[in-house]
Amino acid sequence: MSEQEDSDHIAMWGAPGSGKTTLLAALSFALLQRRGPWRLVGTDPASIEILRDKSAALARREFPPATIDIERFRWLLLGDPVQLQKRFAGRFNGKARTMPAPRVGLNLIDPPGGVYTDKERPADHAKLLENLQRSRGIVYLFDPIREFEDGNAFEYLHGALIQLASRMLAEDAPSDGRLPHYLAVCITKFDDRRVLETAEKLNLVTTDPDDPHGFPAVDDENAQTLFHNLCDISASGSAEFVMGALEQYFRPDRIKFFVTSSIGFYLKPGTRGFNPRDYQNMVRKPQDGTNGREPSTEFEIRGQARPINVREPVTWLAEQIYADQLKPGNGR
Amino acid sequence: MSRDVRLRVEWAVEGKQPGSNDEYGLIACSRGPLNRASFAEVRAEYVTGTPRQLPQITLGWVGAGDNARLMLIIRRWSDQADRSGRGIAATRYFSVPYRQLAEHRVSYEGLYRALDQCLTDPAYPGDGELLDVAVPILNPAELALRVDRTAMSVAALLLSDQHVCIVGDPLSAEQRLRFLDVVAALLPYGLRVKLRASTWTSVAVNHTIRLSFADAAPAGARSVVWGEKAAIPGRFHAAHSYYEHLAGSAPHLTELIDWLAADPEQRAFNAQGRDGALTRLAEFEVRPGTRRRPIHRSSVEQALRECAEHLTGGELAHLENPVAFLREAADNDFAAGERAAFQEIVKESGLLVQLCQTDVRLKEPRKVVLDVAYGPALTMAGLQHVIGQIEVPSRRLLHTLYAMPAHELAVSLYLASRLGGADLFRALDKPPTPEVVRAAGRQPIDAQVVLAVHEELVRRGESRSDTDLAPALRDVGHLAAPLAVALPHRPELQQDKLRKLLSAAYGPALGVRDFTGIVRFPLKPGQGPLLAAALDLAGQDSGEAVRAAVSDYLRAEGLAKAEVARLEAAMRAPEPVVVSPESPPIRRTTSPVHSFGKTSGGPPLNPIMSLQEDREPGEGRARRLGGRLRGWLPHTLSGWTVFVLIVLILFAVTVALVILFGDRGDPAVTPPVETQTSQPQYTPAATFSAQDSPDGVTPSGKPSDKKDSKKKDSDSGDP
Ligand SMILES: Nc1nc2c(ncn2[C@@H]2O[C@H](COP(=O)(O)OP(=O)(O)OP(=O)(O)O)[C@@H](O)[C@H]2O)c(=O)[nH]1
Ligand SMILES: [Mg+2]
């Protein structure tokens, strides 16, 4: 068990406020609610409690508080052998029905974004690097809004990446000089008007014909293009280095791009489809004591949260890690 | 009463720039020996997770030896938000050098209350000045009040190497802090330099907090359900013994906490520290005769209120602490005013009413609360106060009250007269007659007591020829007024009772002197029945008696002796002679008071005694036996004859019982040993049961006898 704990880490990486914790809440929400090849379960009372708590908060339309300490969640992805058979064709030897359910330990690490720099909390920064070193997958969150306003994503990426690389590459250098992690790059807050409009301008928006609500979406193949363009409009201009850094330190076949939103688009109760004139799902909370007229500085989710593409990055990582485990000579 | 310690406190504040997307970081810190870097280290040590609810209070330490410090960390929401609109938590770190506590110890709660108001204004002491606060000295009595088995078992469990998480509690952060405080108080104070505790820890962080409240216990930690006793695994020997000792000292928690707090030696949660803690605890003993630290009135009041709250909330299990505290407090020397205050709380909060519900679990709390508020001895005022709260007291309540020492007989009689039966018998059996009489005349008059006392006095007068009775009755107007209260609008019943009473006190025939002692002119309203009863008993002498009484009165009013004598003679002129065929006239030839008075030469004159003196020499007695058998015999019968009869009956019943149960071979019922040793005349019974005794040893210690007899039995049984 402890071996698995060590090996199956997936770390959330992103600047403060980029949406890491909200994505985790949306993930538990989505994986608990929707059917798919993977199911999320807690492994002990503590993690079950967190799982329940996180999805309940989102259902109450609350955003999580800013993370204070490095948190970790020990969850387990249980795969449905039948559904996964296609994906892992050949590896199950056609015995999917008799196979035990594939299970991938999902030990997620959610640090406060600030710890990705060593400015304020060097001790926690060091701890985080240790964790990253042990982890197999990384969910990297790129927040276009924040980048547009502050433009400091690079600041929270580069330093830590160099340190991680120097630790890992010094120990047992892989042949190509890149980190062994799988990397899911998530463009967050797709529901935000500015992000959606950018995607529309780039003609990247499609609609899934199976989606009953007709929500806008960006195919995974186009996500990288959107990412490039969003980097271009970064406030500091340093975002282009983000792309460069990722390509420099991770193997291209281990990177995948996703356009995500933890809360999704607003759907007016009683209506069926996406309304291009009224889709913002994040609104300011009314101020206490103003009878709902004055907005406060805090945000809340306007309607039901409808996470977009939050399961996909994590299950993609889980599948990659699982596939590696199935490889002959991997001790399993 | 509570004194303060002045402390110089280092501090730091952690937060975020409002409206920014910055990371949490130290915003300000004091310019004491602990600098920014030290506080950053502390911060990294005290990882507790992202709280959902604030405030959160964390207790800890930093440094060692001379540099050891206690840490208090308070995290609260500021009213500001960051760029993403997320509330900003402000965390304040306070550090108190441990040596400042060498003289006097403080509680965690005391520290918290003193410091929670500090540094709330973002304009922090600009030049990093240390804080200077006054913190009240730790109060063992107050902490003792809150000790329960959860606290005791958790304190003991901390002496294992396990982290402990309390789960499933409904408490606020401050209530949690109070619990942590109690747990810490059950450990030697010096362990605080290594104790980390928090009102909340996240299950999602790897923390080093030894004791905390949590939503669930993370793997490897022990979870203790709130309100329950923590299970201490057998392998933790120190923890086990510690718990045993704690539980054993439960009646003296205040002294115990005092004792543990008085131990400032720095200890750690390692094998050595555990042994040290155990030794310290084991050294605790309450020496008999040592004056206990007085318990403060406010803690008692608080405990009483707590009881009421728990009862209102239906939380019977939670009564345990306050009741344990009150039990200890009960024999404290509280001033009357303090007791009165307790009584008011008992009344206002409806505590007593709740305690009188039918639930056996309330028996002990009821007793304890009554002891505290109405003890040490129940006074009449206290009793009235109780009765004022409960219209119809249940037998349960009466019993509890009756079990308390009574301040005066009237109190126990009040209760006993309502309990009746054996209780009433016991209450009336011992106290001397004058006291019993006074109790009946005690204001406020209680009808049931008056009637019960009346019956008892009649019994005493008849059975023991109680010589104290008459003088005692004279002091209280022969209970005429109390009987009038007890039997309102029933003058003939009053008369009947009074006649029996007078007869018990003065004998069946009232002499003139006795009469004038009873009937004193002028009569007050309501004394009619007394006059009637006295006249009735004076019988033939009643005319003479009334004349004497009137003369007494006239003399007392200052009329000349000669004039009074003339009037008396006039009153006597036509002497009526009433001879009833049914009841032979009772005549008294001598005035016993006179003769006795002459011999003894001074007051007080006891008519009954003198009467007996008069009777004993034989002549008078024989005359009465012959002449007034009808009037005399019942009196005698209920006296010596009845006594002798009862003794005979008792004897017969005992013999019958012994035979009956002895026959069934139930030695537990027949007390052969006692019977034989104390009363040799019961030998037949003793022998009988000895033969039946299964172990072959006779009560007289002669096994051979028994064997022999048994042998005979079996011999005869065999063909
Ligand atoms: N529009 C939109 N806003 C989001 C979404 N997810 C998060 N946010 C906003 O971003 C804020 C920060 O999200 P968090 O998940 O707390 O960010 P984080 O990366 O965990 O931040 P730190 O814990 O400070 O490192 C939230 O309070 C929301 O205001 C999303 O899907 N859409
Ligand atoms: Mg977060």
Image (cartoon, coloured by chain):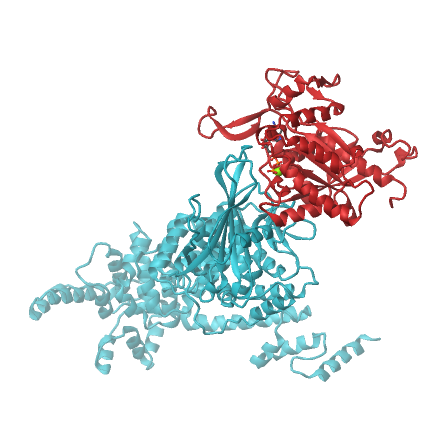
Q: Within the image, what quadrant is residue A239 found in?
A: top right
Q: Quadrant of the N terminus of chain B?
A: bottom left
Q: Within the image, what quadrant is residue B538 found in?
A: bottom left
- Judge by depth and name the residue closer to the eye, B236 or A83: A83
Q: Position of residue B676 (x, y in %)?
A: 60, 79
Q: Position of residue A205 (x, y in %)?
A: 70, 18
Q: Position of residue B682 (x, y in %)?
A: 59, 78
Q: How many marks?
A: 0
Q: Residue at x 24, y 82 (%)?
A: B600
Q: Residue at x 65, y 34 (%)?
A: A25
B134 lies left or right of A55 = left
Q: Give the letter of the cyan chain.
A: B
- Judge by depth and name the residue closer to the eye, B240 or A91: A91
Q: Give the letter of the red chain.
A: A
Q: Quadrant of the C terminus of chain B?
A: bottom right
Q: Residue at x 66, y 16 (%)?
A: A273
- Judge by depth and name the residue closer to the eye, B501 or B313: B313
- Split into quadrants, the picture shows ligand 1 in the one at top right
- Judge by depth and name the residue closer to the eye, B390 or B673: B390
